[in-house]
Amino acid sequence: MQITFQQVEYRYSFNTPFEKLALQDINLSIPTGQFLAVIGHTGSGKSTLLQHLNGLLKPTEGLVQVGEHEIKAKEKAKNLKPVRQKVGIVFQFPEHQLFEETVLKDICYGPMNFGVPEDEAIQRAKELIVKVGLSEDVLQKSPFDLSGGQMRRVAIAGVLAMNPEIIVLDEPTAGLDPRGQREIMDMFYALHKEKGLTTILVTHSMEDAAHYAEEIVIMQKGRLKRKGTPEEIFSQTDELFEMGLDVPDVVRFQYRFEKETGKKLPKTCLTIDE
Ligand code: ADP
């Protein structure tokens, strides 16, 4: 499913004295199966951009197209269920949204709400609990008896249980220890590779953007400031510094080395293992 933003503008509290311009002039195309990272300061418009992908927010100008579904400014409310089914969003701290008595019920809740038969939903839960790095016996536990990291994995399994074609990740590893962060990101990367899942990652981590993404978008004050491959973005570190974005030495080193020598370093050089 191709995603297109055309001249998108978004104003919070539109037509009220509290109106706040949060996005402007956004033109962006995300091809099916791409891994895109979105970076930028707090308040630059990243979350607002993400929420347009499944119609949680509707542009105040312009058009967002997700596959054959169009979400247009000034248009009457549409049934967004088909888009919501295709676009899974892992919000920040998704474990705060767990609520069922058992992990199994929590993972099955979304798909069953969308008409997936119970036995199929259970089957998906059994496969996904392992995929997110937990064992099947966790399914019968209360989500509230798990550790924070385990709860995060359960919440992620719940989003994946909808079988989305596009997955949107808003700081999915915030607050986890370094090993947990790496495991979760590697899992999303593997899913993207195996299933061709379009993956859109909002992150503060330049290492993650450099390590996992095929393209990077930089947001600044509600505008799309730059878009390019990690090589293109990180070979212009002066510009990143001017924007106040801090590029870790390890990322700078990699791109300077590659530019000067014409040799490629393996991607694993970008992350320091504990
Ligand atoms: P980011 O995700 O990059 O931190 P946001 O998309 O959350 O940025 O915010 C973009 C801008 O919109 C900011 O100026 C922020 O203060 C404003 N904003 C975000 N949410 C709301 C809201 N619910 N009402 C009014 N303004 C908001």
Image (spheres, helix red, strand yellow):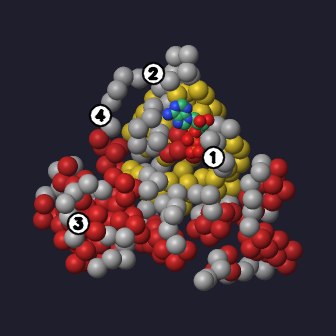
Chain-order first, disc 2 or disc 1: 1
Q: Is residue 118 left or right of residue 228?
A: left
Mark 2: which secondary structure? loop
Q: Quadrant of the C terminus?
A: bottom right
Residue 83 can be seen, yes or no: yes
Chain-order first, disc 4 or disc 2: 2
Residue 32 can be seen, yes or no: no
Label 3 sits on residue: 142
Chain-order first, disc 4 or disc 3: 4
Chain-order first, disc 2 or disc 3: 2
Label 1 sits on residue: 42
Q: CA distance from mark 4 to mark 2?
A: 15 Å
Give the class, few, some or many, for how many residues have Cα within 10 Å of label 1's Cα (few <14, many ≥20). few
- Residue 102 at what x, y percent from top left? 20, 64
Chain-order first, disc 3 or disc 1: 1
Q: CA distance from mark 1 to mark 4?
A: 31 Å
- Circle 1 or circle 4, nearest the eye: 1
Q: Decide if ligand 1 comes within 8 Å of the CB at mark 1.
A: yes
Q: Amino acid at mark 3?
A: Ser
- The disc label shown at residue 74, or none: 2
Mark 3: which secondary structure? loop
- Residue 209: image quadrant is bottom right
Q: Amino acid at mark 1?
A: Thr
Asked whether disc 2 touches disc 1, contact meaning CB atoms under 8 Å apart, the reply is no
Asked whether disc 4 touches disc 2, contact meaning CB atoms under 8 Å apart, the reply is no
Label 4 sits on residue: 79
Q: Amino acid at mark 4?
A: Asn
Q: Nearer the viewer, residue 30 or 111?
A: 111
Q: Decide if ligand 1 comes within 8 Å of the CB at mark 4.
A: no
